[in-house]
Amino acid sequence: MSNISSHRALDRRFDLEQGAGSDAVHVDPQYGYAVTELFSDSGKKGTGIAYTLGGGTNLICEAIELLIQPILGRDIEELMQDFGRVQKSIAEHPAIRWLGPHKGVIHSALASITIACFDLWAKERKQPLWKLLLSLESAEIVSLIDFSYLEDLLTADQAMEILDSKRDTRHERLGILDEGYPGYDTSVGWFQYSNDQIRDNALKAVEAGFQAMKLKVGSSDPRKDISRIGMIREAVGPDVKIMVDANQAWSVPTAIEVCLELSQFNLSWVEEPTQPDDVLGHAKIASAIHPVPVAIGECVSNRIMWKNFLQAKAVGIVQADCTRLAGISEYLAVSILATQFPVKVIPHVGDMGQIHQQLVLFNHIALAHEKLFLEHIPHLRDYFVHPATIENGCYVTTDVAGCSTDLV
């Protein structure tokens, strides 16, 4: 028995170097985390994080205090045996649900709490998250997930069948543990960086082993974006993958117009071209700019929105983020759901890769999602006790127990 004996909610914010983290919409951001710490009577601590851009992190911390009571005093093993039901009961609390539902401050708080539970559970079992998830039977994975509102596309029984159907071929995909999961570099091309700075960063990224990079677009004058992407394509050559991210800056007509211009540079995807709740707008963009896929996820807040985006053929790159969803359990729901569609799963990494470096291993080995690459952003690595490690452009598989979310 290892009971959750106490907790803390912490507001952690970190200033960035000039220009870092900037995009067409978010100017001079901080990076922040609303942190949940769970302490067990065995002496272990579980740490959960919900990613922010600084402002309002305190509101999420207040919501953590509002939501956390049902898990206090619980044995962690007993809690995780039926976590899907527990999470549903918290999210659907009749006096609190109105504040969401399933989005915003409340949902971010649930993400932080959920990740703390998984971190504590993995530490109690003395396993990194990826190894713990891969050790579970299909029924145990399914019990972690709340499938409500997904039943028209994915029931618990169907999810179990999907997991079971991939189990016999897992051994064919275990090589990724030794190879490392490929990364792509986002830090080369922040919006406020000069052209010379971006070009230098891009060349350094290639030298460091990255074969893919992402650049920010969304200027008021699209010619600036077109010129900048053309410059980087010329600098890195035809074989390096280039993605662009507008961070919701465009209207649907503008997105279509600019994306068609940018497609001459052989883009791997266009990310967040317009307002993140506009499912039909994204579908229109996706149809117009095909075969360049649309990528979304960092602001898609719940599994129901993901169901709608997938049904509408409005997304080609699923950037589901467990710190935006209700933590690891809802992320698993989206990842399983995505196996039924012709999409690629490449998580958004607002958490600096700490958790998603492990979830992509589960995606590939347990669900047979294609091995692609995972975003890398290095700006907060010094604030983690066990930061994600990159060698020759690849994430090194961690052997540290937990989710690697502990902060110094």
Image (spheres, grey):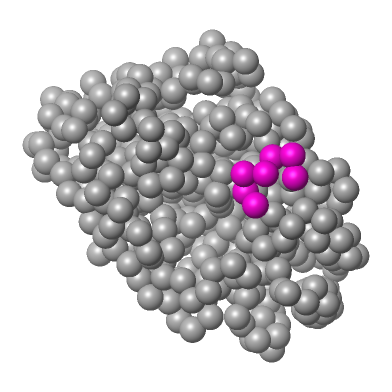
The x and y percentages for residue 320 are 56, 43
The x and y percentages for residue 318 are 64, 42
Give the residue at the far bottom of this rendering: 196
Give the residue at the far top of this rendering: 157
Quadrant of res 96: top left
Q: Nearer the viewer, residue 276 or 183?
A: 276
The x and y percentages for residue 105 are 38, 47
Relative placement, left or right, of 347 versus 240 is: left
Position of residue 79 relative to residue 220, above or below, is above
Q: Residue shown at 52%/28% (left/top)?
A: 333
Tell me which segment is drawn in magenta.
275-281
Position of residue 374 relative to residue 22, above or below, is above
Image quarter hosting the C terminus: bottom left
Number of numbered tags placed on the structure image: 0
Image quarter hosting the N terminus: top left
Relative placement, left or right, of 213 versus 79 is: right
Q: Residue 312: in sight, yes or no?
A: yes
Q: Residue shown at 79%/58% (left/top)?
A: 255
Q: Residue shown at 41%/58% (left/top)?
A: 52
Q: Is residue 278 magenta?
A: yes
Relative placement, left or right, of 329 versus 250 is: left
Position of residue 34 relative to residue 29, above or below, is above
Q: Residue shown at 65%/86% (left/top)?
A: 194
The x and y percentages for residue 206 are 68, 73
Q: Residue 207: in sight, yes or no?
A: no
Q: Is residue 123 magenta?
A: no
